Image (cartoon, rainbow, N blue to C red):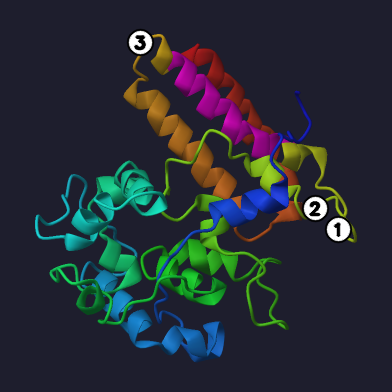
């Protein structure tokens, strides 16, 4: 339905819990900003790992996970969710560039016994502050934008949401087909004491799914998107993030029409 937030059969609040998955905390901004959780040994390890790549710089594209990564070997042989997570991660943006389980969860992937593998600064399910620290160890500018917004109120000193709730954790860059950014935001905005987002913002959020659907339809017809189309889509994502991360309502209203126009032109281009 054009111009409206889309609601499926899945309750949006339930969807938030499904999307949020395990990330390891990392001390990036320290206790003063993120709280005591960021000072855990696991947090220190994650920061050191990203720091070896230079903060804000992801691993090189095409970097494969090491052959002795027993995290993947063990979980792939498991049943149920544990094995499913391996496939989800490997098809994600992080998996494709070689970010391993231990980069976010800690632990020792060289060990073959579970107790030993999970004994080295291992954290399975960090809280929101630790998740922000872990992601921010590489994504500095995005975290910097986020901490200026209303999703991280200064007086409260703790985030209302974290990176994984919107971007996914194991599925970063490859969200499930059922995920809708507009629906996710509507899980709070428009309910109880929060007014709904302006229609322009709703259209901007829906644009993400519109472009995803157009690219998928094109692929289903055997048409590979051009490098230029992929570049334009990434630019639209970047411009959208610069509005959403700092929750820039006033500035966003002046910039959204141009972004929507770019999106419409791109959709016409790939049809």
Percent x, y of residue 94: 32, 51
The quadrant of the image that shows the N terminus is top right
Quadrant in which residue 17 is drawn: bottom right
Please, is residue 190 above or below residue 4 in the view? below
Kind of element beneath mark 3: loop
In this rendered view, identify the residue nearer to me: 30 or 81.
Answer: 81
Front residue of 247 and 208: 208
Q: Position of residue 28 (x, y in %)?
A: 41, 79
Main SS of the magenta part reads: helix
Point out the residue furthest to the front here: 79
Rendering coords of residue 12 (x, y %): 71, 47
Give me the residue at 49% from left, 61% from top.
142
Q: Is 166 placed left or right of 131 in the picture?
A: right
Q: Is residue 206 magenta?
A: yes
The span shown in magenta is 203-218
In the image, farthest residue toward the left = 67
The residue to which callout 2 is attached is 189
Res. 266 visible in picture: no
Vertical relation: 115 (above or below) 2: below
Disc sitting over residue 215 in the figure: none
């Amino acid at each position: 339905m054009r111009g409206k937030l889309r609601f499926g059969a899945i309750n949006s609040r339930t969807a938030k819990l499904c999307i949020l998955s395990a990330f390891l905390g990392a001390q990036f901004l320290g206790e003063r900003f993120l709280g005591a959780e960021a000072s855990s040994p696991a947090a220190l390890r994650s920061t050191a790992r990203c720091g070896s790549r230079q903060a804000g710089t992801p691993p090189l594209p095409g970097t494969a996970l090491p052959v002795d990564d027993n995290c993947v070997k063990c979980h792939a042989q498991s049943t149920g969710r544990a094995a499913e997570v391996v496939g989800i991660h490997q098809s994600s943006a992080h998996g494709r560039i070689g970010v391993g389980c231990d980069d976010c969860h800690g632990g020792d992937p060289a060990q073959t016994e579970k107790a030993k593998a999970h004994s080295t600064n291992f954290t399975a399910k960090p809280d929101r502050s630790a998740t922000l620290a872990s992601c921010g160890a590489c994504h500095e500018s995005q975290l910097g934008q986020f901490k200026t917004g209303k999703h991280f109120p200064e007086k409260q000193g703790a985030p209302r949401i974290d990176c994984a709730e919107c971007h996914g954790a194991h599925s970063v860059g490859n969200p499930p087909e059922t995920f809708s950014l507009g629906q996710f935001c509507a899980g709070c905005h428009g309910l109880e004491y929060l007014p709904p987002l302006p229609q322009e913002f709703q259209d901007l959020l829906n644009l993400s799914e519109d472009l995803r659907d157009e690219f998928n339809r094109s692929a289903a017809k055997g048409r590979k998107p051009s490098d230029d189309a992929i570049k334009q889509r990434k630019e639209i994502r970047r411009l959208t993030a610069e509005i959403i991360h700092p929750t820039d309502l006033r500035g966003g209203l002046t910039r959204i029409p141009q972004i929507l126009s770019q999106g419409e032109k791109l959709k016409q281009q790939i049809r």
